[in-house]
Image (spheres, coloured by chain):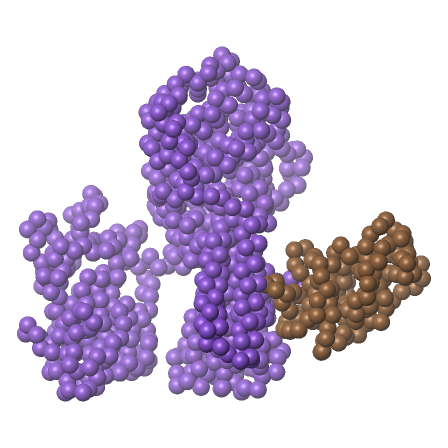
Chain colours: A brown, B purple
């Protein structure tokens, strides 16, 4: 019930990530591309002594390409023992969830549909709660699976 | 050995400690299967280890306990109170003995039969252990502080990531210092700090890493002992010992590996008689190898024994109630083999001291799976079994070469690199055949792929401006990879990459460069696959078999050079230690011949008649036969090559053994045997023994004696083969193989040893050698 949520903006949409899954929010400086990797893997970056696999959330949602020049904000998450940096437009705030996620009955885009856990009520209004692992997996892999 | 014993003691103590609770619980509830399994594993492990260490008392005890427990596991017996106390008494006794071993004392003689008898069904409840292992005096020593401590890997991880962060902070600081005003005192202090951090990083990284060799080193001995007990002959071939692996992993693999090897020798490889009947060589082959492939370490244990009988496994499984008869019929051949991993199942006809009843296999699998690994099993009846342990590469240090395309850096594991050549070098030609790249490097054609093309990266360089890296992936054929630039050799700490990165098939992992930026490490086999190069996998076992056969003559590597008088000559690479350049003052006539001074050594010098004029530099090959050194002067090195053609022997023995075609032109081959025979100094050589007794691994035999023997009309076979030899040449002092002593020629390195065996010949006694060769050859006809 009282789950904390991190509000971020992806593709100009305000969505919520479970705050427990987010280790930190960083600004990426280096981005080393990974040739031949699936498109939504934007590259590798380093956070202290760890290698981060950088995920372009817009590509993962098939909503375009995130900006990778200049100041890039990313949320660091861990999925299956690997650390990922999710590129987001901006990070806003941490809020408390006021409800359990409930199914979204409106028609969302296929990308959002795939990563959606449900809709949660917050003080900031209703937000889409995003499944981090699905975001990392990407659209192409999800179809293959 | 002491290390191994310390490990054994530590392991036993750890298990005993964790068993403490289990034992009590088992006593209260003898039907508890999980507890029974744990206790069973303990005695099984103890038994396995002490067979290896030669602790007969421990072995008897643990074997007896294991027998009784196995009966319980198989449902043949109920765990009643007397049995429980008997087992507990044995575990206590094992604990006492382990303490004795830990103190470095010999296990005293003693009688454990009372304990063992107590295990028998229907025996009286075991009395309190009648005879303690040692007296009270030894108890005091127990207080001695242990010299090692065990740390949790988590703690080490924390320390390690802390050190890594420290390195990055240092680099950041270095940048700031460079930009700002530099103060000498600050710089000095920073340098010191920097050095300490580097050292610390090194040390802390090493704490977790261990060469897998540590795991392999005990195997040959263990197999030898097993062979003695079982009356079998097994040749162990070990490869890949230099792969480094997380220490924790090594410990986890130790038991499974031991079990598998024991099983292979005990159940897999047949007795010599049976092998001959089956048309195989008497000696069984057991090959153990480790290699890194992608993000895994693969450990292969392959034998050429009788294989696993799937049908028998099914019968056993049905009999043991693991499998319903109806289901059994539906199993595929592969699923049948998998039955071997079921607890409490074995194909052995009877229980042996060695590997028990196949119980090892369920333990093996659970151990390997606990570290995220897989056990693969492949078996062909009559032909052998291959077990592969696939262990994840969690964290590994890999020596690597960094290369770049454009401005992006990558790393290539050094183990796969054969050589590095410039694409515009003299001995290299690039061509396109049907659109595919082919590089011809010194006459050898290898497929060539450009890294930029494989990765789809833009590159400003043309094909000719690149550098070719000749790669040989594990189990595959060579190919050349063209890269823009080659940078540096580095030891990289490699971590597995995220699944999305691994899915490309190109990479083995990621690592951080010194400036903290990530670098991708290539998987050489994956590059070839994506680049479209076909890799013909070579079966290891077939390669080994070929090497010991008589018909295959391996290409001998030679160094092609020009002598001082301008002749094109070749010398076997193996006898050349290194190349030196000396000033003319270092070359002088001494004691009747030319000698060259190299550092503190003075060597006889060949290939030169008179001392060179002052002020000139002379280049010298430093030749070594394992005991003494000779210098050979030359003008220039032409190339490295291989002898492919026949060697036409020279008319009379001398510096030149014969002429052969190398790279399409004639070259004179240097007779290293003659050279050493001529220049050898008995005073230096006396009293020293050859290093290796096995002619197969004896470089002297292979590279110096072999040409002579071949010139005398013999076909040379190496090692122990099934080809019957007419003459066996061995170095002294060897264990005479009794039945072959009459045909054996001993070579000694000492010209005038008083106590020498009259049948032996001084190894540079060319006349005597030729005579013996002739005599033996004459005896055949």
Left or right placement of residue B634 versus residue B122 in this view: left
Quadrant position of residue B393:
bottom right
Nearer the observer, A38 or A58: A58
Residue at (54% x, 46% y) in the render: B152
- Please name the residue shown 61% across and 83% down the image: B458
The quadrant in which the N terminus of chain B is found is: top left
Specify the quadrant that holds the C terminus of chain B.
bottom left
Spot occupied by residue A24 in the image (x, y as percentages of width and height): 71, 61
Observer able to see residue B770: no
Q: Specify whether B646 is left or right of B172.
A: left
Rendered position, A49 above or below B605:
above
Q: Position of residue B91 (x, y in %)?
A: 48, 26
Residue B261 seen anywhere in this rendered image of the structure: yes
Residue situated in front as seen by the camera: A6 or B600: A6
Q: Residue at x 21, y 84 (%)?
A: B617
Identify the residue shown where x is 54% and y is 21%: B84
Q: Which residue, as the protein is rendered here, is positioned at the far right? A: A106
Q: Could you tell me residue B327's position as x and y percent? A: 67, 37
Q: Is residue B589 left or right of residue B55?
A: left
Instruction: Provide residue B408's location: percent of width, then percent of height.
Output: 58, 77
Q: Nearer the viewer, residue B17 or B762?
A: B17
B754 lies left or right of B323: left
């Amino acid at each position: 019930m009282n789950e904390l949520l991190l509000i971020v903006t992806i593709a100009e949409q305000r969505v919520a990530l479970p705050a427990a899954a987010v280790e930190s929010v960083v600004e990426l400086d280096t981005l080393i591309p990974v040739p031949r990797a699936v498109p939504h893997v934007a590259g590798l970056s380093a956070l202290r002594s760890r290698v981060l696999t950088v995920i372009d959330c817009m590509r993962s949602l098939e909503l375009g390409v995130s900006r990778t020049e200049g100041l890039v904000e990313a949320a660091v998450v861990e999925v299956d023992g690997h650390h990922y940096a999710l590129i987001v437009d901006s990070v806003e705030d941490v809020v408390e969830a006021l409800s359990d996620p409930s199914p979204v009955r409106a028609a969302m885009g296929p990308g959002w549909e795939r990563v959606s856990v449900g809709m949660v009520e917050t003080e900031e209004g209703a937000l889409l709660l995003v499944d981090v692992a699905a975001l990392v997996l990407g659209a192409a892999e999800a179809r293959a699976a | 050995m002491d290390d191994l014993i310390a490990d054994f003691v530590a392991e036993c103590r750890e298990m005993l400690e964790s068993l403490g609770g289990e034992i009590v619980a088992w006593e209260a509830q003898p039907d508890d299967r999980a507890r029974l399994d744990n206790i069973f594993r303990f005695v099984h492990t103890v038994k396995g280890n002490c067979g290896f260490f030669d602790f007969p008392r421990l072995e008897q005890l643990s074997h007896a306990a294991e027998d009784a427990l196995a009966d319980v596991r198989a449902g043949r017996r109920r765990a009643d109170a007397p049995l429980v106390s008997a087992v507990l008494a044995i575990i206590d006794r094992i604990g006492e003995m382990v303490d004795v071993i830990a103190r470095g004392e010999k296990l005293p003689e003693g009688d454990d039969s009372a304990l063992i008898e107590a295990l028998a069904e229907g025996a009286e409840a075991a009395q309190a252990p009648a005879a303690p292992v040692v007296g009270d005096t030894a108890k005091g020593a127990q207080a001695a502080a242990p010299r090692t401590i065990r740390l949790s890997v988590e703690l080490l991880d924390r320390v390690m990531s802390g050190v890594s962060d420290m390195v990055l902070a240092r680099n950041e600081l270095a940048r700031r210092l460079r930009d700002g005003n530099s103060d000498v005192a600050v710089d000095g202090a920073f340098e010191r700090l920097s050095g300490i951090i580097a050292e610390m990083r090194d040390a802390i990284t090493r704490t977790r890493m261990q060469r897998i060799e540590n795991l392999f080193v005990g195997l040959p001995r263990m197999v030898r002992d097993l062979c003695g007990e079982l009356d079998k002959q097994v040749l162990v071939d070990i490869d890949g010992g230099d792969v480094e692996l997380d220490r924790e992993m090594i410990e986890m693999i130790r038991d499974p590996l031991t079990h598998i090897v024991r099983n292979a020798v005990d159940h897999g490889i047949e007795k010599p008689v049976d092998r001959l009947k089956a048309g195989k060589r008497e000696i069984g082959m057991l090959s153990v190898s480790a290699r890194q492939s992608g993000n895994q370490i693969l450990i292969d244990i392959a034998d050429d024994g009788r294989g696993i009988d799937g049908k028998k496994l099914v019968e056993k499984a049905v009999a043991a109630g693991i499998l319903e008869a109806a289901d059994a019929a539906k199993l595929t051949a592969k699923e049948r083999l998998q039955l071997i991993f079921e607890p409490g199942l074995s194909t052995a006809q009877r229980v042996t001291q060695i590997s028990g009843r196949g119980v090892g296999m369920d333990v093996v699998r659970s151990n390997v799976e606990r570290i995220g690994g897989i056990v693969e099993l492949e078996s062909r009846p009559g032909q052998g079994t291959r077990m592969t342990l696939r262990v994840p590469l969690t964290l590994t240090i890999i020596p690597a070469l960094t290369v770049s395309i454009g401005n992006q850096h990558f790393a290539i594991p050094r183990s796969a690199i054969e050589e590095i050549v410039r694409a515009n070098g003299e001995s290299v030609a690039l061509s396109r055949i049907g659109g595919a790249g082919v590089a011809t490097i010194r006459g050898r054609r290898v497929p060539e792929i450009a890294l930029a093309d494989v990765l789809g990266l833009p590159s400003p360089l043309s094909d000719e401006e690149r550098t070719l890296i000749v790669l040989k992936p594990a189990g595959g054929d060579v190919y050349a990879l063209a890269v823009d630039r080659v940078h540096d050799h580095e030891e990289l700490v490699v971590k597995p990459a995220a699944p999305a990165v691994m899915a490309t098939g190109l990479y083995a992992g990621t690592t951080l460069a010194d400036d903290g930026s990530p670098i991708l490490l290539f998987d050489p086999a994956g590059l070839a696959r994506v680049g479209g190069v076909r890799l013909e996998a070579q079966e290891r076992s077939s390669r080994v078999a070929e090497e010991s056969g008589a018909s295959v003559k391996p290409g001998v590597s030679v160094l092609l050079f020009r002598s001082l008088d301008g002749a094109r000559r070749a010398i076997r690479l193996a006898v050349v230690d290194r190349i030196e350049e000396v000033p003319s003052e270092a070359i002088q006539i001494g004691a009747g011949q030319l000698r060259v001074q190299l550092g503190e050594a003075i060597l006889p010098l060949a290939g030169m008649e008179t001392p060179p004029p002052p002020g000139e530099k002379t280049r010298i090959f430093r030749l070594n036969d394992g005991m003494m050194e000779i210098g050979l002067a030359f003008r220039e090195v032409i190339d490295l090559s291989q002898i492919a053609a026949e060697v036409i022997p020279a008319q009379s023995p001398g510096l030149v053994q014969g002429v052969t075609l190398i790279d399409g032109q004639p070259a004179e081959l240097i007779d290293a045997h003659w050279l050493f025979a001529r220049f050898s100094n008995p005073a230096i050589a006396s009293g020293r023994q050859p290093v290796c007794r096995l002619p197969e691994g004896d470089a002297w035999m292979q590279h110096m004696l072999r040409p002579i023997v071949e010139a005398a009309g013999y076909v040379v076979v190496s090692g122990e083969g099934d080809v019957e030899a007419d003459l066996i040449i061995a170095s002294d002092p060897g264990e005479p193989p009794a039945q072959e002593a009459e045909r054996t020629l001993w070579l000694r390195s000492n010209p005038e040893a008083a106590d020498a065996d009259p049948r032996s010949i001084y190894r540079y006694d060319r006349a005597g050698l030729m005579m013996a060769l002739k005599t033996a050859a004459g005896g055949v006809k």
